[in-house]
Image: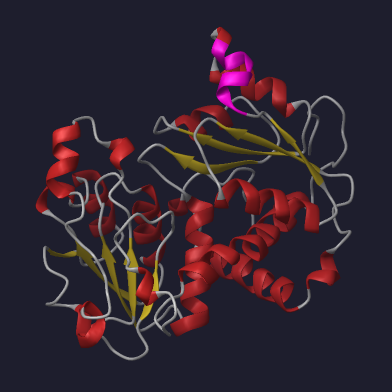
Amino acid sequence: MRHDHVLTARQLSRGDVEEVLDRAAEIAADPSAVADRHAGALLGLCFFEPSTRTKMSFEAAIKRLGGDVVDMGSVESSSVKKGESLADTIRVIEGYADALVLRHPRQGAAKMASEFVDVPLLNAGDGAGHHPTQTLLDLFTIREAHGLDDLTIGIMGDLKYGRTVHSLAHALTTFDARQHFISPESLQLPRGVRYDLHEAGAQVREHTELEEVLPSLDVLYVTRIQRERFPDENEYRQVAGEYRIDSETLEAADDDLAVLHPLPRVDEIAPEIDDTEHANYFQQAHNGVPVRMALLDLLLEDADVGAIGGDAR
């Protein structure tokens, strides 16, 4: 890894991805080998939106590396409620930590914040923009199930507002992957994302029905219709519940089909799928710990851990 910050999946080369995934595989096989590697390191958690998996897995990751966290806490209990800007907040917390994790509802917030800090900053989701660390654990899960070359993947659901979709689609362009995008017409990939994928050499295949591509898929990546991203409640109601995966749906699927979901789910995957061989989404969530351990390990190995006042590197 040769990056100070991890802001989008687009900045990661195939070599970067493979380095993180290989390190994650080593850590998953023997977590004790890195138990004290970053003793004394502090990870600053700056979450301006709710989070369960991302926040807890980052906290678990740094603690399993021997470090600890300093947590901004909820927006309601912070100085943000007093009108403090993101730039000021991030510059202050930089002085308390060796690396920062930022989740923010505004697209582009992570890139802007990175311009004000010298310690590594990791984007944990910026509105409908990007979520690169989620993409790394998605790729790790896919690699464990099917490998990342000669892969046929269907990405279904909210492709317009889904930051996990945008990041994953970009990352897959560096591998031999055939991507099919399944969504209502109103939730298709944004024009800018589609253009970037074309520029990266991907052939964008868009569908409104899963049935026409399901038998050919190795992986089906399902996403939630994100109510909180819709500017118009009526627009959400028109598409809510439009796609649902159940046992009957998967009768036409290959026996080895891996079903992934970044979670949380609402009703897009029936609970009856949970106990089948298709279900990979809980393991996918668990993979967040070794993958984020690997990423932090690589980013912190050259940092001046413990420097007071944010004087990292």
Front-lying residue, 156 or 23: 156
Task: Look at the image and say whether residue 44 sits in the magenta stretch.
Answer: no
Q: In x, y percent, where is residue 57?
A: 64, 54
Task: Look at the image and say whether residue 75 sits in the magenta stretch.
Answer: yes
Q: In x, y percent, where is residue 171?
A: 42, 61
* Residue at 29% across, 40% down: 227
* Residue at 16% across, 57% down: 242
Front-lying residue, 264 or 14: 264
* Residue at 83% across, 44% down: 41
Front-lying residue, 172 or 216: 216
The C terminus lies in which quarter of the figure? top right
Residue furthest to the front = 272
Q: In x, y percent, where is residue 147?
A: 46, 82
Whether residue 229 sits left or right of residue 2 in the image: it is: left
User: Relative to residue 230, is residue 218 depicted above or below?
Assistant: below
The N terminus lies in which quarter of the figure? bottom right
Span shown in magenta:
74-81
* Residue at 57% across, 70% down: 18
